[in-house]
Image: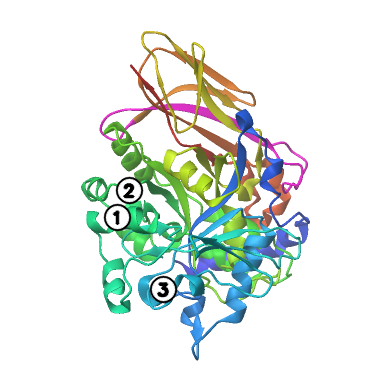
Amino acid sequence: MKITDVALSVAISFVFSACASNYESSLPDSAELGSPRGYRIARVITHFHSPYSYDACDKKGIIGGALNSSCLANLKDAFCKNRVDFAFITDHPAHQASYEIRDLLLLEAKDHLIEKNGLPYANKLGNCANSFEPTLLTGIEGRVIALGMEKHLNTDIAQRTALYAQETRDLTTQIESEANGVVVIPHTESRSIQQIKALAPSAIEIYNIHANLDPKIRKRDLGLPPFEDIPSILTYLIDPYGSLNPDFMFVGFFKLHPIYAKKWNELIDAKLKITGLGGTDSHENVFPQKASDGDRIDSHRRMTRFMSNHFLVTNLDVDSIKTAIKKGRGWLVFEGFGSPVGMDFFAVAGSTTVGVGETVQLTGQSATLTVRAPKLHGKSPKGGGDKPIIQITLKKVLPNGEDKIIATAEGSDLSYTTQEIGAYRAEVNITPRHLKSLLGPFSDKSEESFPWVITNHIYLEN
């Protein structure tokens, strides 16, 4: 990082910060995003750290035996304001393994404990100022992630602490069979295909915010300059006029590295129908300084607003969302650009219709793959009046980690008819011209194309 880069960013911010516009800083209810083929869209956050993680809350998650109350309040406020339907807390074994499930569910007054067979396994928040009721579940992030654990795997604290740090097929089998958890491989950028196959997860991360920013991970696993995007972040910290919109800081660092698609393609080509999802990996432990909006730069609210997963469910209950994640019935959304309304991806072969995450047998007939073009929700941020450019790409998975573009559309639905078997996914890019006046010194980014929606696969088989 060069000091001149920082100085230039700050100087530019003097000029543009006064141009910032107001916007709705929270996300809309997922019920307003459409009902594709009769399903209900659920907004889901995975890979998230509470004060029970040793490195969360600036490493002050537990103070004198009590949870850091302000950090806990920030976490719940994020899920409330951004109307997160399901938040899968995944704390590190230190200190997660030292506490019981009831503690890890972060229960407070007005919250509603959900039990199964007389045992606690979920918490529906009851104190949101907007009356929304997110559902919180607990789990672990060691070398593997367990989403929505309903029990610990061992009654002895020392033994389960050691167990949760392992990276073995025995552990993932126990998570699934004993704790009814969903196994996810975090930080896919650091794992070999052989490791992932051996662990047999239900899902992998195809993007991780922490990996996008952490200098060590960027250099070691992504081959990127470690401090390349720090100047843009510092601009929002300094913000001399106090009028930048730090919720849009992400446009300065957001990059979807091709290593994720390559590894996902390899797994899918090996006939492993593994779900792809985004890991928020929020800790509130990077930038404690507050930005001009009163939130710390790395606030939980800001992180959950930037990215979420949208899964298609029949009911807003825990079993339904776990099933949807395992089946890959949904898509990753970079919701900081705006919330997509009307998104869908499905295939019709003869009289059979299947959706994302599902398989259809062609038996000699053709299938028509359709991607519904999403539109911005009415309360999505807008600045400058220009409409975004929305482009759809349909891709087919190839061997050796490759894929190919087989159809594209701009500003309209996409339909493609084929008799070729294989795995297909849709990607929607957005050129965020609608955000121009909200981006301050980075307004030129409004003319760049960014990933907006990445779906899981539809499988055409004989």
**Residue closer to the observer: 89 or 186:** 89
Q: Residue lying furthest bottom in this view?
A: 64
The percent coordinates of residue 415 (x first, y second) are: 54, 18
Cα separation between marks 3 and 1: 17 Å
Residue type beneath disc 3: Gln
The residue depicted at 31 percent of the width and 67 percent of the height is 164
In this rendering, the answer to whether 292 lies above or below 170 is below
Residue type beneath disc 1: Thr
Residue 460 is covered by the magenta coloring: no
User: Which secondary structure, mark 3?
Assistant: helix
Magenta segment boundaries in residue numbering: 375-402
Residue type beneath disc 2: Pro
Q: Main secondary structure of the magenta part?
A: loop
Q: Which residue is mark 1?
A: 172
Q: Who comes first in sequence, dot 2 or dot 1?
A: 1
In this rendering, the answer to whether 285 lies above or below 442 is below
Quadrant of image for the N terminus: bottom left
Q: Is residue 444 among what the camera can see?
A: no
Q: Which residue is mark 2?
A: 201
In this rendering, the answer to whether 296 lies above or below 66 is above
Residue 379 is covered by the magenta coloring: yes
Q: Do the residues under discs 2 and 1 have CB atoms within 8 angstroms?
A: yes
Quadrant of image for the C terminus: top left
Left or right: where 204 falls relative to 129? left
Q: Which residue is mark 3?
A: 96
Q: Who comes first in sequence, dot 3 or dot 1?
A: 3
The percent coordinates of residue 330 (x first, y second) are: 51, 39
Cα separation between marks 2 and 1: 7 Å
The residue depicted at 67 percent of the width and 53 percent of the height is 439
**Residue closer to the observer: 200 or 423:** 200
The residue depicted at 62 percent of the width and 31 percent of the height is 36
